[in-house]
Every structure is written in C-alpha cells, then in structure tokens.
Amino acid sequence: PYKVPRDSTLQSEEILHSLRLGDMEDNLLISDKEILSTTESTGAKRLFLFSKQALSMQAPDPPPCVLEPMTLKFPAEPSPSPLQFGSIEQQLSPLHQALEVYERRFMLHLDHGRVLADGADLRLTASRTCVTEQAVMARALRAAVSNLSVHFNGTLRLRSEFTSDFQSKTSAHASLLQRFESLMNSLSGIQLHPSLVTAARASGRVMETLLDTVPVERERAWAAQCQTSHQRLISMFSDLEISFSELGTTTSREEEARQDLEVEEEIKVLWKEVEGTGQQIRDRQAECLKTLTSDHGEVVKVIMNAISGDGVQNAFTVLEKMSQASADLIPSMRKDDEISMQLMEKLASSKTKAMKRMKVRLREVSVAQSAIQRVNASVGVLKEALAQQCDNMIHLEHVSELPDAYRDFISEICRRRAYGGAVSSSSTAMMERLASLREDEVKARENFLRGSGRHLMPAFYEIFAPTLPTPPPLFTPQLPAMTEMDNMPDVGPDNVGGSSSAASQMQGGISSASSLTSSSHPQAEEISTTDNPPNEHLIVSADQTDNGMIGDSSANAAADRRTLMYENAILRQTIERMGSKAPRTYIDEAKDRNPQSAILGNLQNELKDEKTEVRKMREIIRKKEADEKICDKISHSSFKVHDVALFMPTGRGSGGKRTYLAFHTNCPHHYLSIDNIRGTPDFVLGRIVYQEGLVAGELGTEANPFGLHVGTKFFVNTVEVLNSPS
C-alpha cells in the first residue's frame, strides 16, 4: 500500500545525505541527541510513508503490541560438569558424591543466571526498540501536522484575500442592481441635443431623451439575469463560509497540538525509564552472572583440591560458606527480571495505545487535508463565477456611466468641430496669403519688364532666362475633404462658447476657458481684459473675439479665432474630466452669491480677531495678577518655579564645593545650583527662578556632580536668595 514518489530530487546526493543524517539521529544508541529533539540544526531530513488503506474507515485496529521475550525458559538439569567424576576407577565414596552435589548445584545456578542475564539484554533491546518506534510515530505525526498547518494557513490567507475581493465586488454589484430602475428613470429626464434629435428623425427613429438610446427591455432582462446570478453567488459564498468554518479554528488546533506534545513528553519519560531502570537491571544481571561464574570456578577448584588431597572435610566447610553467600543471587536476579518484564508490558501497552491514537490522528489529518483541497477547489470555482459576473455587469455599468459618457460625447463633438474649423480657417488663410504673395510678385515682374526689362537684349530672354517674361505659377493645393465634419452633428456655437440646454442639465454644460491660450494669443488676452469683468479675466470665450483683432487680413483673424476655439475646447474638456464641472459653472456660482456676503465675511473675521486679542489680554492680566500673589511659604512636598525652598548643606560635591539639598518631604534630589553658593553658609533660603531636570551619569563625571546612582533623576535649582547667613 505504500507509494514512493518518483521524484528525481530524492536521488540527489544532498537529499540522500540529509536522510542518512536523520537515520543517525533517530538511532539514539549512536547519537548523543535527546529523543524527540525540537532543534534540527544539522540539516537532517526524514521521509515518512503512510498507508491509505490503514487509515480507511474499514481498516481494523492495529494488533496489540507484544514484546519478546516475555517468559524465560530455565533448564531443569545443569550443564555437563567440567569434573569427570565417572572416570575414577574406584567407586565414589559418599564424601565424593556430596562434593558432586555441590558442583551440580552451583552449575545449575550458573545456568539460570545466564538465562536471566541474556534475557535482560534481550528485554532492554526490545524496550529500546519499542520506545524508538513510538518516537518515529511521533515524528511522523509531527510532520503530518506541520504539513496540514502549512495548507491550513495558506487556506486562511486565501480566504482573507478572496473574501475581501468578493465583498467589495458584490457590494458594488448589489448597489448597481438596486439603483438600476432609478438610473433608467433618471435617463428619461436628460434631453438630447436638438441636433441629435434631428439626426435621429432623419434616420427614421424618434429619440428625445437619453433613455431612448437604451434598449430598455433587453437591459432589464439582462439585469434580471444578473440579479439571479448575484443571488446564486451569495448562496455559494455562504456555503463556502460554512466549509471554511468546518476546517476548524486555531484554538482547536492548538488543543490538538497540546495533546500531541503531552504524548511526546510521555515518550521521553518512557525513554528515560528504559535508559535508567532497564539499563540498571541489565548491569545488575551482568554483575550477578559474573559472580556466579566466579563462584562456580572457585567450587571446581575446591573440589579438585579435595579429591587430590585429604582435606575433604575442610572442602565441605568452604563450599557451605560459598553456598550461603550466593544463596540470594538467583532470587535477586528473578526479582529484577520481574521488574524488567513489567516495564516491557508497560511499554507494549503504551505502544498499542500510541498506534491506535496514531491511526485516529492521521485519519483526522487526512480528512482535514481532503477538506482543504475541496475548499480550495470551491474557491477556484467561485472565483471563475465572480469573474463571469463581473463581465456580465459591464453591460449594466454602461447604463450607469451613460450620463457622464453623454456629457463627454458632447464635449468631444465640440472639440472635433473646433478642430475642423481651425484646420479649414488655417488653410483658407494660407491660400489667401499665397494669393497675396502672387499678386505682389505679378506687380513686381510687370514693373521690371516695363522698366529695365525693355532695355535687355534678346539673348537675355532666349538664352540666359527664358522664363523671365512669364508670370509666377498659380499655386492651387488640394486639401483632403473634411468628410468627418459632414457626418458629425452640429451642436451649435452655444456649446462652444457657453452652455446649451442639454449641457446645462449636466451641471453647467460646456463653457469656454483658456488661461493657457492667453500666453500664445496676446490678442485674445487683450480682448478678454477689455470686454470681460475683472473677476472673469481668466475665462476667454471664442465667440467674444470679434473682427477687431490685429492681423494681416480677415482670414488670418478667422484662423486665429478658430485656433483659439479649438484650444479652448481641449482645455474645457480636460477641466470637465478633472472636476466634473464645466468652467462656466464656477463663474455662475460666484455671480449667484450675495454681494454682501463678502463684506459680512470680512466683518466676521475682524470680530474673530478682536475676540482673540481680548482673550490674549485677559490671559496676560491673569498671569500678572498671579505673579503678584506669589506665596512666601517654604515648600517642602513639591518644588516648582516661584516656590520658596530651604537648602541645607549635605557635603562636598565633585567640584570641591559644598552641596545644598532642599529640605523636603518625599521629594528628594532637588539641589541648589553652585552659582547661588557664596562661601559656606549654614543654609540658603531662596525663591526658585529656574529649574532644570537631569539624569545622573557615571560616577566621578560632570554628568553626576552629586554622587548619585547612575540613572537617578535630579533637579538643579537656580534661586533668588532671600536669606543666607554668612
């Protein structure tokens, strides 16, 4: 059931080295690191494999853990004796038989000790393996929870970003859908320009208001569809919010993390118990086995000496003492073996519980991962639906922006017609200028031919300059036809210089303004300053520029006037786009104001200034009266400027002069400035005229002249001495 990813990165030398480091760190017998260490500074990595079948609902619970060996098999008979009692030719005496019984007893105890010592080694190894496997499970769970946390936090960020975008767009859509009918009704109140109405009638249609240009039924049907899709989006977003809430909260995940941490702490405690109790039992068993082996060797030596000599009776005494001395070894080893077995049962039970909890936790993580993926997929679907809804709402936004678009349309028509007039007038002026130059050239040639030309020889006309008697060529340029002007509605000159009826319905319509063009057209500036009132010198109407402008001819004046009209149209269009109000509107608002309002405003400002002066004078008088009422009582609980203080000597400071401290009650560190000290008076009584707060610096420096602790805040007071005994 395990699926190993076929990733080329797993075959890189760096990744393989990191995985080997992880295996070494997990092997606590060769690593000096603490089990389940939270610090990974060696670059070690671990690869965990999870079985999906084992995490399914139909999968059975993991089988109970059983550590081996739980029971030890003790031999009933001792091992063969190193002594060959049966090889003796003569029949064994009863004493020799008794010696053999002693040797057999010690050999049996040695065999039992070996079984117990070997069992202690096996049980310690099994215990270590069990705890290590639990640590691996804890690391695997830690990795799974960390991966889930990364995806969960990413989903939270996705939720925050998408929710903000969704709410901003849907609120705008809801507002537009709610205002749709009122927008349609407002369009019926905006009258089209008469020239547009005439153009519509010429094409066989009747259009009098801005609403007549809108396919009303189709737009309303489209608005109904958008309303339905908007409600569906809101419903889908509500379902998505429910799905987000089902993913859990940070608090619940913190509780799960706390439980995981408690399990890891239990594993650490088990490891310490294994390394403590288990290791000690194994060492004691080894020591007991060593003692049994030594005793058996000593028994064999005593028996051999007894058989070869006559000291059989003495041998029994020695053997009995050795038997009594080693009588507690085997019971002690069995008792330690019971403790080791109980530890193994505890570890097996802990591992069984850990495996069951591991299955539950990993399944929770797997279910949460699947839920996060489903939520992310739902967010993607809802994003696409929101994008489609935004595309659908564009058609309704056209209706919302139609009044402003119509205003800009009128301004654009005026600007283009002004452009056409400027081009036509400029070309006419150029043609007239060329005709005037040709006329002057014809007169000059006639004067030459009638004068000096009469005296030239034929060679000058035939060889040197054959074209000398010919008139100048007639220059007739063919300018492209301005067909665009023929197909463009004529909104009339009122929309160029003033405001039309249609434009006045859109906040003042279109007026003419060109403070910018006055610099390039001084004549226009002159007309503006002479014909208009002083408060309107920045507004120049092209219609007000009459034929009195200075120029070479009426065509040049007309060209300049048309150019000024075009520039005014550009400036007027820019101002309307920036301020959403026509330039003429500002002038009309100024004219509509009450002429007396300016005078009233000036009077109010003057009154405000006079009140301010009165308040200042009152404050000065109050301070002067307060200064005259200065108290002459000696202060002791607080010190401020104008207070009277009594300074008493306290010793000598860093400069060698005596230091004087203010007599106080819970208000320390108020010292007298050395500038006020003359001689060595017993006290100084004075009124504080200046007070400076400082912080004590290093001892022995000018920043700490009074020997205070570093950082202590103190005050240096300059006083007007009232009484100072010499």
Image (spheres, helix red, strand yellow):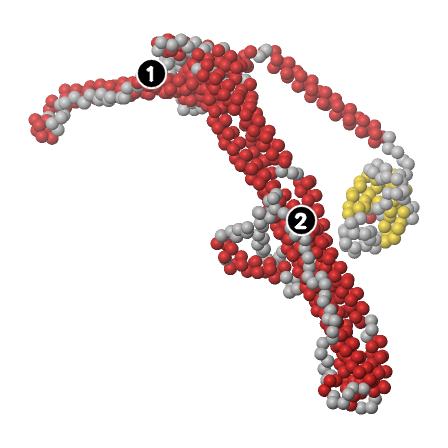
Q: From the top left corner, tell me how far across and down residue 416 is, in percent.
A: 38, 19
Residue type of the residue flagged with mark 2: Lys
Q: In this view, does 345 lie to the left or right of 7?
A: right
**Res 511 visible:** no
Q: Residue at x 75, y 81 (%)?
A: 297
| Residue 202 at x, y percent in the picture | 35, 9
Residue 54, horizontal then vertical, whole percent:
60, 48
Quadrant of the rendered structure where residue 498 is?
A: top left
Q: Residue at x 44, y 15 (%)?
A: 215
Q: SS of the residue at dot 1?
A: loop
Q: How far apart are marks 2 and 1 (CA)?
A: 85 Å
Q: Mark 2 points at which residue?
A: 356
Q: Is mark 2 on a helix, strand or loop?
A: helix
**Disc 2 + disc 1, Cβ < 8 Å:** no
Considering only vertical position in the picture, is 124 above or below 91?
A: above
Q: Of the numbered discs in the image, which one, if any, rests on residue 487?
A: 1
What amino acid type should be assigned to the residue bearing mark 1?
Answer: Asn
Residue shown at 82%/37% (left/top)?
641
Label 1: how many Cα within 10 Å (few below 14, some 14–19, many 20+): few
Q: In this view, which residue lies farthest toward the front?
A: 91
Examine the rendering and report whether any part of residue 191 can be seen: yes
Q: Residues within 10 Å of mark 2 (few under 14, many from 20)?
A: some
Q: In this view, does 195 lie above or below 653?
A: above
Instruction: Give the mark count.
Output: 2
Q: In this rendering, would 655 be left or right of 481?
A: right
